[in-house]
Amino acid sequence: MIIHGRLQWALAAGVLVFSFAAVVASLLDGGNGTAATTTTTSVVATTTTTTIPVPLKHVVQSGESLFSIGQMYSVKMEAIIELNNIDDPDKLAVGDEILLPQGSVARVAPVTSTSVTNSSLVTTSTS
């Protein structure tokens, strides 16, 4: 397992400290014959960014600019302006179709998935 973020490090450290405390508590129990059960839960989040090939044109949506479209497709705004012979980049209208340079790739928003793993540690002591 590869730990990437602060939250994941904190969770891993918490699980380790909690497990260590449970083992110490069971050793200090004095052998009174009781069973101690410790349940730990760990949450692992993974993020995957996917790139997909795109068509060579884009339909302008509300709130988009040539700069934001360039970022979306990993293309410089100047390349879009040059390819489409745009005189005034500020006069982009919703519904306009603009051509994209060859080899443009769309970035899809990262997808985060979370998995939960439960494990139990049972410690018993006898008198």
Image (spheres, grey):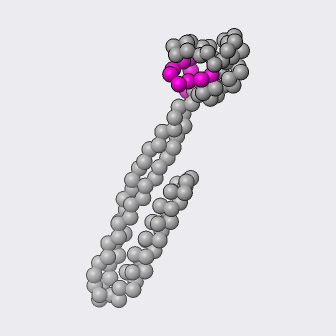
For this view, does 75 lie left or right of residue 21? Answer: right
20 in relation to 111, above or below: below
The residue under the point 39% across, 81% down is 25
Rendering coords of residue 49 (x, y %): 54, 37
The residue under the point 68% across, 23% down is 77
Q: Decide if residue 49 is in sight here.
A: yes
Image quadrant in which the C terminus is located: bottom left
Rendering coords of residue 22 (x, y %): 40, 75
Image label count: 0
For this view, does 98 lie left or right of residue 124? Answer: right
For this view, does 19 lie left or right of residue 101? Answer: left
Of the pair 56 and 98, the residue shown nearer to us: 98
Rendering coords of residue 93 (x, y %): 55, 15
1 in relation to 68, above or below: below
Of the pair 127 and 79, the residue shown nearer to us: 79
81 in relation to 70, above or below: above
Q: Decide if residue 101 is in sight here.
A: no
For this view, does 5 lie left or right of residue 126? Answer: right
Asked where in the image residue 24 lies, by quadrant, the reply is bottom left
Rendering coords of residue 13 (x, y %): 50, 65
The residue segment tinted magenta is 51-66
Asked where in the image residue 70 lies, by quadrant, the reply is top right
